[in-house]
Image: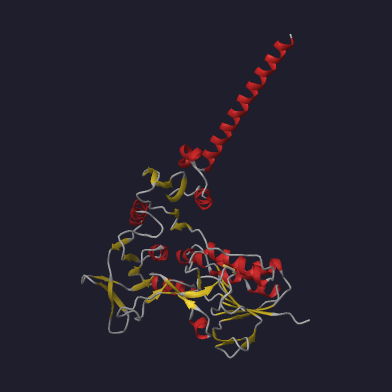
Amino acid sequence: MNKPKLVLVGNGMAGVRALEELLKIAPDLYDITVFGAEPHPNYNRIMLSPVLMGEQTLDDIVLNDVNWYAAHGIRLLLNRTVTRIDRARRLVHADDGTAVPYDRLLLATGSSPFVLPVPGHDLHGVISFRDIQDVERMIAASAKGGHAVVIGGGLLGLEAASGLAARGMQASVVHLGATLLDRQLDVTAAGLLRATLETRGLEFLMARQTDAILGDEQGNVRAVRFKDGTEVPADLVVMAVGIRPNVALATSCGLHVDRGIVVSDTLQTYDPCIYAVGECVSHRGVAYGLVAPLYEQARVAANHLAQVGIGRYPGSVLSTKLKVTGIDVFSAGDFVGGADTETITLADPLAGVYKKLVLKGDRLVGACLYGDTADGAWYFRLIREGRDVTDLRDQLMGGEHAANDASATAVAGVATGAMGDAASCSSNSALRAA
């Protein structure tokens, strides 16, 4: 019998995770074809920073090598970009002329780095930080030394600047906001992070808006100019100001798109034969860029592609656990707080540790950790489950271990009391018998 045909467009982390989940449930259900625009097999984009730092190589961060695809009977078409989807005929067309039929189609087209549309953004030496090719270009540029300007004070920007500094470049980070990682950290934690990174040689130009990137007569970048008229020299400019979902393919074939490819709780698009997962997706109006939500989507999509049909993706409660150039940070929920919340904080500057917990009534609603994130997962569970933490309040800052010790002590106390009561009753019974 001919198997139904499944085509995956996008060989990234979310799409291939969906295949992994599918193969666990229904390993022989489909003939599978995978299109990948890059020449590499599936690799871990989160680990691009260690590659830039020289700590790992591309081979070290590959998640599924070509042998994995072959072992599962998957047809892998690398270095080919899908240019058109014919929904009427259920055909996927690639830029090399390949046309592959499908019964089910999974779109995992990911996202692209946003490039500021300022004058000079197309000069030689202006790059983004998104894939292996970008890393290779940064490594090549760093071999010449000079001054690197990284636009964007988010995680990618800090990792890019740290990697380039480690390779010998003078690195400056330009950020429009007043604090670093302003979506992941509160003001105090962001200040600690900045101070630590400054001791490692990074320079920060905060509250600066890029006006233009300036070039020389040969078309090479030479400086960055800001709205206030000031300039900073640059031999390399790295754009790390955000991402945008890749939706052009979905739009061109008539799928419903609203910032991302709109999907239901089953990760199904408005075409029942087409599913979508990852950074290209808009679910209940939200597009996710973190790995954990994308893997949750992949698991549900695989469930339905396997024809089990009981999975449901309601959305994700977000937490962020990052290692910024060796510094651990974590945040979850409403870590900023407000008038109707109260906070518990711990600060140990000598140890480089800062913890902030936000409570609303008898519930933990937010957490921000710097330097010591060992209990991040526990705090996240308390936030996600909406658990009453009244009895844990005095142990919350001590973390899960302290809370467990307190619970064990309380249980032991109750048990001891119960034994005492039982002994008393026994004695009274004996007296009555006498």
Q: Residue at x 35, y 59 (%)?
A: 180
Q: Outermost residue, right direction?
A: 1
**In the rendered view of the protein, which quadrant contains the N terminus?**
bottom right
In this rendering, would 196 be left or right of 62? left
Name the residue nearer the viewer: 378 or 215. 378
- Residue 383's spot in the image, x, y percent? 49, 51
Q: Nearer the viewer, residue 369 or 261?
A: 261
**Residue 316 at x, y percent in the picture:** 52, 61
Residue 60 visible somewhere in the drawing = no
Q: Is residue 216 above or below residue 309?
A: below
**Left or right: 30 in relation to 352:** right
User: Nearest the camera: 141 or 261?
Assistant: 261
Answer with the quarter of the image where residue 200 lies: bottom left
Along the line of sight, the residue nearer the viewer: 400 or 328: 400
Identify the residue at image location x=61%, y=69%. 301
The furthest residue to the top: 434
Residue 279: x and y in percent read 50, 71
Q: Indicate the quadrant containing the C terminus: top left, top right, bottom left or bottom right.
A: top right
Q: Can you name the residue that lies furthest to the left here? A: 229
Rendered view: 18 above or below 88: above
Please determine whether, in this image, residue 295 is positioned above or below residue 352. Answer: below
The picture places residue 428, in percent across and down from the top left corner, at 68, 14
* Residue 86 in sight from this viewpoint: yes
The answer to whether 380 is drawn above or below residue 144 in the figure is above
